[in-house]
Amino acid sequence: MLHQVLEALETATGPVSLDELSRQLKIEPGALEGMIAFWVRKGRLRSGVGGACGGACAHCGPQAGTCVFNAGGPRTIALVERTRSYPDR
């Protein structure tokens, strides 16, 4: 089931609300919270509160908690973009 959560987010076109993911996967929100927390700890997902920008605004950075567009929106979950690291030469 953990991998189904990750797969659903990999096929999504952007951040997904917790309620939407819960309905899509037919998983109780409480159980889904634990699965999301697992992937957040592993660094594969990020979780936040989305506002007008859907929580995907790259301009907020550390100030995301004070963003006027990010106040009181639904909680969203999104994949963390993986970057390929190359060893220093």
Image (spheres, rainbow, N blue to C red):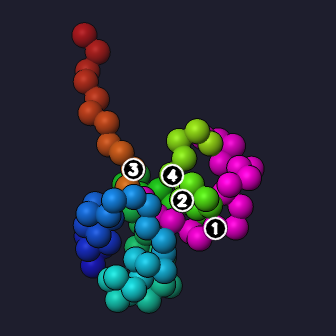
Residue nearest the observer in this picture, 56 or 86: 56
**Lower sequence index among marks 3 and 1:** 1
Which residue type does callout 2 highlight?
A: Gly
Give the residue pinned by disc 4: 56
Q: What numbered label is drawn on residue 80?
A: 3
Residue at (66, 57) in percent of width and height: 70
Residue at (31, 36) in percent of width and height: 83
Which residue type does callout 3 highlight?
A: Val
Q: Which residues are magenta?
A: 61-78
Q: How many C-alpha atoms fall within 10 Å of the one at disc 2: few (<14), some, or many (≥20)?
A: many
Which residue type does callout 1 highlight?
A: Gly
Residue at (58, 39) in percent of width and height: 59
Q: Are marks 1 and 2 in contact (CB under 8 Å)?
A: yes
**Lower sequence index among marks 4 and 3:** 4
Quarter holding the C terminus? Answer: top left
Q: How many C-alpha atoms fall within 10 Å of the one at disc 1: few (<14), some, or many (≥20)?
A: some
The Cα atoms of the two marked residues, 4 and 3, are separated by 11 Å
Give the residue pinned by disc 1: 73
Residue at (53, 41) in percent of width and height: 58
Q: What secondary structure is marked by label 4?
A: loop
Quarter holding the N terminus? Answer: bottom left
The Cα atoms of the two marked residues, 2 and 3, are separated by 15 Å
